[in-house]
């Protein structure tokens, strides 16, 4: 009797060999860029129209400030971990992470890319997550601190009286308080979640102590996190100067910081839509005409979001293919 070997199917729980998973992941960012561009085609057309009437030296300076934000992000990411990260791949990852951040809800894209990058570099997942939390903490503290410092120095930079209802702060504070109470109750009554949170907090505090025992890491962390929002605000100021926005540069910077702090909790991809609206409101509150403020915001978002989006997606796909992330 001759034994006949039957063909074996794919191992349960695994993709068949013929499915090119990594190739699909490489092309996915390009598909998302196309979808988002089609959805915002009117905004893109209007934004590029405003760029044609702007003064190009200021726009080139704004593009340069945008490029420096990726360098600042790389410094901050390195400062958040004691381990030495490969510089070129770290910088390329920040460029790709910027694109991912505009394709997924705010912060999730960049966080996922950087978390994967640190894991591939050999940093355990617990420490990578702690480094990610430390980065977000440093960036939030410096952004809010810079805004408060500028508001103390220039208290008349923003005038929201005519733009916001008088009773707008009450519901906002009530919502924030309710969210804090819900979070505290969940941690108090869900033991497994509380245990996980405590364990993560211990890891994060240990990483924080380790980073601050090395002056070079602490300087990179806090210097980079301060430079990042400052460069972003400088980009808006330069675009405003290119289009002749009649608002003092410092007031434009305050408007940018106030708008980005206000929309930090809005879960839209890259803040698309919410950031534009908040920036227009903030620039009008700073004394700018509505039409010019709108033109400045659209031109600024073209430079900082839409122009880097396609090359950033290509870089993201290349990093996936090369197994850097």
Image (cartoon, grey):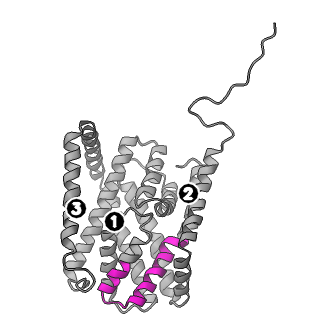
Secondary structure beneath label 3: helix
- Foreground disc of the pair 1, 2: 1
Q: Marks 3 and 2, how far apart in space?
A: 35 Å
Nearest the eye: 72 or 303: 303
Residue 217 in view of the camera:
no
Residue at the image position 66 percent from the left and 42 percent from the top? 19
Q: Marks 1 and 3, how far apart in space?
A: 13 Å
Give the extent of the magenta segment.
Answer: 279-307
Look at the picture and state if 121 lies above or below 300.
Answer: above
Q: Which residue is mark 1?
A: 264
Q: Quadrant of residue 32?
A: bottom right
Q: Which residue is mark 3?
A: 176
User: Horizontal placement of 123 versus 138: left or right?
Assistant: right
Residue at the image position 30 percent from the left and 79 percent from the top? 254
Residue 56 place in picture, x, y as percent: 53, 87
Q: Which residue is mark 2?
A: 316
Q: Give the overall secondary structure of the magenta segment.
A: helix
- Foreground disc of the pair 3, 2: 3
Label 3 Cα neighbours within 10 Å, binned few <14 / some 14-19 / many ≥20: few
Q: Is residue 215 magenta?
A: no
Look at the picture and state if 297 lies above or below 104.
Answer: below
Look at the picture and state if 151 lies above or below 108.
Answer: below
User: Horizontal placement of 23 versus 283: left or right?
Assistant: right
* Nearest to N terminus: mark 3 or mark 2: 3
User: Horizontal placement of 203 versus 22: left or right?
Assistant: left
Mark 1 touches mark 2? (CB < 8 Å)? no
């Amino acid at each position: 009797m001759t034994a006949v070997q039957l063909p074996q199917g794919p191992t349960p729980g695994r993709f068949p060999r013929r499915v090119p998973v990594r190739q699909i992941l490489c092309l996915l960012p390009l598909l998302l860029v196309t979808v988002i561009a089609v959805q915002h085609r009117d905004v893109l057309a209007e934004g590029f129209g405003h760029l044609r009437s702007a003064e190009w030296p200021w726009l080139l300076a704004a593009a340069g400030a945008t490029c420096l934000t990726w360098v600042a992000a790389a410094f901050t990411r390195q400062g958040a971990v004691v381990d030495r990260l490969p510089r070129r791949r770290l910088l390329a990852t920040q460029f790709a992470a910027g694109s991912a951040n505009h394709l997924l809800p705010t912060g999730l894209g960049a966080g996922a890319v950087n978390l994967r990058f640190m894991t591939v570099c050999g940093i355990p997942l617990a420490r990578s997550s702690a480094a990610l939390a430390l980065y977000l903490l440093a960036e939030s503290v410096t952004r809010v601190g810079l805004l408060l410092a500028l508001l103390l120095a220039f208290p008349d930079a923003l005038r929201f009286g005519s733009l916001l209802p008088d009773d707008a702060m009450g519901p906002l504070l009530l919502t924030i308080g309710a969210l804090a109470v819900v979070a505290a109750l969940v941690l108090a009554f869900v033991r497994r979640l509380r245990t996980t949170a405590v364990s993560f907090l211990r890891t994060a505090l240990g990483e924080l102590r380790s980073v601050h025992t090395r002056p070079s890491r602490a300087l990179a962390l806090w210097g980079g996190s301060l430079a990042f929002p400052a460069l972003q605000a400088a980009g808006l100021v330069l675009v405003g100067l290119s289009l002749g926005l009649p608002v003092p540069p410092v007031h434009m910077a305050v408007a940018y910081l106030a708008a980005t702090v206000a929309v930090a909790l809005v879960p839209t991809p890259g803040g698309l839509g919410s950031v534009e609206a908040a920036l227009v409101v903030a620039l009008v509150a700073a004394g700018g005409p509505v039409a010019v403020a709108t033109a400045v915001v659209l031109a600024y978002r073209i430079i900082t979001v839409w122009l880097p989006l396609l090359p950033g997606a290509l870089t993201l796909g290349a990093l996936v293919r090369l197994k850097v992330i």
